[in-house]
Image (cartoon, rainbow, N blue to C red):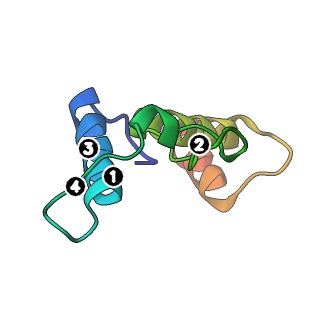
Amino acid sequence: MQICWFLQCVCDTLDRVVRNFIWQGTTDRSMHMVGWNKIIKPKQLGGLRICPARLQNTSLLDKLVQSLMQYDDKKLWVSLLEDEYLS
């Protein structure tokens, strides 16, 4: 999830798997007591703070870009990429 942009259908499938796990658990029968829109809210607003897959994918990719753009505190993998591809 951190190294490539997922298609929307992949993100929808991941969200569906998470929803099914939360709502069904280990039983086959499920009764939805809380809506998905309430579950993804922050804890301060009464939710469980579960990130949708698209938001999580975007934020992890942004974190990689920030690591590449920082010049002060370079990580080893950033230095290796710069030496290999940017020099």
State the separation of the CA atoms marked 2 and 1.
25 Å
Asked whether the viewer can see residue 4, the reply is: yes
- Judge from the rendering whether residue 42 lies leftward or rightward of residue 33; answer left or right: right
Residue carrying label 4? 30
- Residue in view at x 67 percent, y 47 percent: 43
State the separation of the CA atoms marked 3 and 1.
5 Å
Where is residue 76 shown, x and y percent of the image?
66, 61
Residue carrying label 3? 16
Question: What type is the residue that disc 1 sits on?
Answer: Val
State the separation of the CA atoms marked 2 and 4.
38 Å
Q: Callout 2: few (<14), some (14-19), or many (20+) C-alpha neighbours within 10 Å? A: few
Where is residue 18 shown, x and y percent of the image?
33, 52
State the separation of the CA atoms marked 3 and 4.
14 Å
Give the mark, 3 or 2, whose residue is nearer the N terminus: 3
Which disc is residue 18 wearing?
1
Give the mark, 3 or 4, whose residue is nearer the N terminus: 3
Compare residues 24 and 15 and report the one nearer the observer: 24
